[in-house]
Image: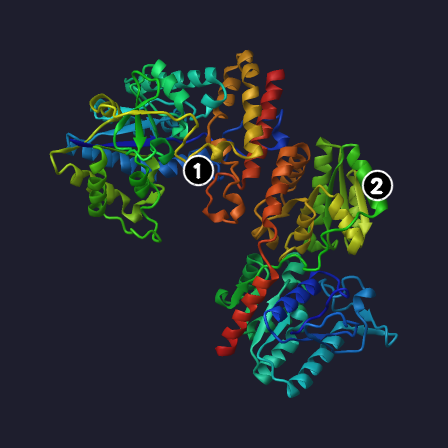
């Protein structure tokens, strides 16, 4: 039996607005900006819902009905859930139907899509618990497999997942972890009796997520026939292919016009045209496949950039000082017991915020290739720091 | 090449740009005769022939900013030689006559004309002598008039020159858009070529003692120095900077604003600073250049370009060279090529004030901007510009 574990990540941050120095101590609205502004959460969510969430969920539902062996795993952040409930609740209804079918699994993660694991373990635990409760309440299922924000993974996170009795944890199948081994097997993280490690097949995943519409790629245009051949070839080295990517790959990163929906539709039907091939949820992969060996990864690996590390979030001095300032306020914020203040602070832990302060690609002069809700990494930093100053003001009040 | 000034006898960026372009072109193998409307000693320049069109000495010594304001035409320029005033139009007529005589004996491959000042001569070369014309626009009359309609005579000359030209070189996309939208010149005819820092810009030098003492004393007391350099004219948007200064000082009194330059808005700005109650935080230096100007750049923490319309904005590159943090309007051409700067729309006084406050109160932000700016401010070179010119020349010659 050969299986594909298709895992899609659903997330939208709650972006802060252009919070000016003149707002400090005057205005505590950090997140609601005008609908027309570029950082409007409502506008962005509605746009992506039309382009990606609706058509892709429809495609998934259609295939679930058509093929008994088609399965998908989703991770849905708390900030996505909140916005969907408010702006487009039919999305939730549809996901509920999918989960009820038993063939769509929801994974565990931090509610706020944060990197709290690296800064404050108590906060991390709180956010994972809050997410678990939100998933249980909305979808009536308990997450059994964990994915940390940005697939940030190391041995410590694996051990944490093991103590929390997760069946599995996801990570990037990066060469430095695998050291020549294939990602197409289930592994055992070092020192973990229960938890299994599922590694992203980044070549086959990124062929879809990043390269699909790249006309300078020598494999362009990518057809389902060609991709099927690659899948089959890859199966010679293990029988589990982990395709992990953003849900928005379908319709937003790769527009409908590129043919991405037809492509994935054909891949699903062609893959399932052979009885020896199937799809697996992340839990099923952990249950059915025997781990082939133990893997240790002391330093942190993510699924981002060619570096596959945390440098997109925590490398430059603005990101470091903003994050340090943020976490230094935690205890004081919690002591106030002011639920609005605490919620505001937690919304600031979302990893998209330091990401928007990233200057790695900013200096190339390649401004147009850079997508951000803010005019520049510097503006993002200014607004974030202003908000933290206002939070300090509220703490003292 | 038809030019109007060359340093050190220049009143602004035009002469600097012309000199650097000509030298880079010569280095790429171009042979250049450079026509100038006045006669000064340029024996230090040997990469091209400089041909004086008149025997006057350079006129900006008498009238600051003689030809870049919308009020040029009625303004008369005193002549050193004649002892009475010569209108700029008379000099332009002489310039045209010289070009006619010159072209009777010479046959250049291309005539490259800089700004409206030389466009009439360029048109003659194109229409009477059928020599391909490349018009180089460093600023339009709309820029000088703060995006309003300027002097109608200048508009007419500018328009005719742009229509006659085979190709147009502009210093930014902003200028490209202005020329397209206001003069309806097809976009395909217009090529953007960004300027660079003056090749002769001195990188190592020592602060002038007087300036250093005053400014460094202030810095020791915790003041942040914010400065701007330019003509005090409508185009530069200085009153908005003054209003932003007052707003910023209300939050952080440890700010000093240096207004370096001179122009028709000077008295208005001085009055404004008094009315806003921030006179003690504002320094007017008058018109400065060379060493003194560099002292200002060197002492500056934040350099602001507040222009309502700035085709390029060389002063920002100079300030960057001295390690200043930049705040630029989106309406400046230089903001198209600099990423590591804070930007705002010229009318957004509150945002400008907020950006000044952010840099002055946040060392991490200031250092990040400085560090990243250092890496990028030399990406555009005169050599690349010259190569672009040569490519355009060969295109117009073969057309």
**What separation in Å lies between label 2 and label 1 (alpha carbons)?**
48 Å
Query: In the displayed structure, would residue A154 be above or below residue A356?
Result: above
Viewport quadrant of the C terminus of chain A: top right
Q: Name the secondary structure under disc 2.
A: helix
Query: In the displayed structure, would residue A240 be above or below residue A286?
Result: below
Q: Residue at x 56, y 73 (%)?
A: B165
Viewport quadrant of the N terminus of chain A: top left
Instruction: Left or right? Give the position of A18 relative to A13.
Output: right
**Residue farthest toward the bottom in the current orientation of the protein:** B104
Find residue A147 and report its image quarter: top left
Q: Are marks 2 and 1 in contact (CB under 8 Å)?
A: no
Give the percent coordinates (x, y) of residue A383.
57, 33
Query: In the displayed structure, would residue A151 be above or below residue B369?
Result: above
Crowding around mark 1 (Cα neighbors within 10 Å: few <14, some 14 to 19, many 20+) is few
Find residue A283 and report its image quarter: top left
Find residue A246 and report its image quarter: top left
Give the percent coordinates (x, y) of residue B86.
80, 74
Q: Residue at x 34, y 16 (%)?
A: A162
Give the percent coordinates (x, y) of residue A306.
42, 40
* Residue picked out by circle 1: A307
Which of the pair A4/A128 is nearer the observer? A4
**Residue B214, disc:** 2
Which of the chains bears the disc numbered 1? A
């Amino acid at each position: 039996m050969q299986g594909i574990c298709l895992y899609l990540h659903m997330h939208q941050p709650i972006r802060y607005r252009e919070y000016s120095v003149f707002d400090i101590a005057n205005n505590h609205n950090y997140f609601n900006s005008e609908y027309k502004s570029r950082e409007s959460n409502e506008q962005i969510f509605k746009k992506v819902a039309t382009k990606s969430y609706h058509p892709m969920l429809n495609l998934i539902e259609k295939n679930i009905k058509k093929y008994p062996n088609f399965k998908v795993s989703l991770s849905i952040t708390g900030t996505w859930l909140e916005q969907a409930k408010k702006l487009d609740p039919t999305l939730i209804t549809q996901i509920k139907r999918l989960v009820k079918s038993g063939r769509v699994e929801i994974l565990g993660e931090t509610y706020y899509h944060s990197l709290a694991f690296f800064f404050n373990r108590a906060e991390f635990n709180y956010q994972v618990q809050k997410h678990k409760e939100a998933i249980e309440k909305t979808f009536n299922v308990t997450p059994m497999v964990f994915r940390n924000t940005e697939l940030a993974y190391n041995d410590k996170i694996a051990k944490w997942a093991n103590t929390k009795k997760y069946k599995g944890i996801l990570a990037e199948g990066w060469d430095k972890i695998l050291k020549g081994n294939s990602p197409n097997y289930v592994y055992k993280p070092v020192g973990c009796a229960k938890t299994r490690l599922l590694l992203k097949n980044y070549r086959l995943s990124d062929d879809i997520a990043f390269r699909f519409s790249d006309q300078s790629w020598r494999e362009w245009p990518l057809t389902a026939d060609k991709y099927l051949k690659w899948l089959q070839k890859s199966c010679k080295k293990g029988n589990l292919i982990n395709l992990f990517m953003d849900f928005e790959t379908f319709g937003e990163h790769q527009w409908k016009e590129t043919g991405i929906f037809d492509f994935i539709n054909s891949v699903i039907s062609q893959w399932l045209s052979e009885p020896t091939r199937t799809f697996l949820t992340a839990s099923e992969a952990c249950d059915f496949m025997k781990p082939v060996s133990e893997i240790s990864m002391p330093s942190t690996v993510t699924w981002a950039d060619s570096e596959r590390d945390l440098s997109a979030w925590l490398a430059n001095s603005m990101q470091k000082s903003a994050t340090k300032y943020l976490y230094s306020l935690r205890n004081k914020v919690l002591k106030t017991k002011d639920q609005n203040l605490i919620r505001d602070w937690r919304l600031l832990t979302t990893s998209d915020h330091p990401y928007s302060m990233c200057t790695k690609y900013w200096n190339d002069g390649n401004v147009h290739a850079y997508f951000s809700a803010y005019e520049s990494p510097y503006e993002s930093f200014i607004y974030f720091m202003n908000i933290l100053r206002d939070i300090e003001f509220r703490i003292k009040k | 090449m038809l030019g109007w000034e060359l340093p050190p006898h220049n009143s602004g960026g035009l002469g600097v740009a012309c000199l650097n372009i000509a030298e880079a072109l010569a280095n790429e193998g171009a042979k250049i005769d450079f026509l100038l409307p006045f006669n000064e000693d340029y024996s230090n320049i040997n990469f091209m022939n400089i041909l004086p069109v008149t025997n006057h000495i350079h006129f900006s010594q008498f009238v600051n900013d003689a030809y870049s304001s919308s009020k040029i035409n009625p303004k008369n320029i005193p002549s050193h030689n004649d002892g009475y005033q010569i209108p700029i139009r008379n000099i332009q007529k002489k310039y045209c006559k010289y070009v006619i005589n010159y072209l009777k004996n010479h046959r250049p491959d291309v005539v490259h004309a800089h700004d409206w000042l030389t466009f009439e001569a360029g048109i003659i070369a194109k229409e009477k002598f059928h020599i391909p014309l490349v018009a180089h626009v460093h600023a339009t009359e709309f820029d000088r008039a703060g995006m309003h309609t300027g002097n109608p005579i200048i508009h007419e000359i500018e328009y005719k020159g742009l229509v006659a030209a085979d190709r147009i070189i502009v210093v930014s996309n902003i200028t490209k858009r202005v020329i397209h939208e206001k003069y309806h010149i097809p976009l395909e005819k217009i090529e953007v070529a960004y300027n660079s820092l003056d090749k002769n810009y001195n990188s190592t030098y020592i602060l002038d003692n007087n300036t250093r003492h005053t400014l460094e004393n202030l810095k020791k007391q915790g003041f942040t120095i914010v400065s701007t350099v330019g003509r005090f004219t409508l185009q530069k948007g200085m009153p908005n900077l003054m209003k932003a200064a007052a707003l910023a000082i209300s939050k952080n009194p440890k700010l000093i604003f240096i207004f370096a330059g001179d122009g028709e808005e000077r008295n208005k700005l001085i009055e404004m600073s008094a009315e806003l109650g921030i006179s003690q935080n504002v320094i007017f230096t008058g018109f400065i250049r060379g060493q003194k100007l560099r002292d200002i750049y060197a002492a500056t923490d934040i350099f602001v370009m507040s222009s309502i319309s700035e085709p390029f904005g060389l002063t920002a590159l100079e300030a960057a060279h001295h390690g200043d943090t930049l705040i630029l309007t989106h309406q400046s051409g230089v903001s198209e090529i600099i990423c590591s700067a804070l930007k705002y729309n010229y009318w957004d006084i509150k945002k400008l004030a907020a950006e000044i406050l952010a840099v002055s109160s946040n060392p991490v932000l200031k250092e990040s901007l400085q560090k990243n700016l250092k890496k990028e401010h030399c990406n555009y070179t005169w050599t690349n510009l010259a190569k672009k010119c040569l490519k355009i020349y060969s295109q117009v010659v073969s057309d």
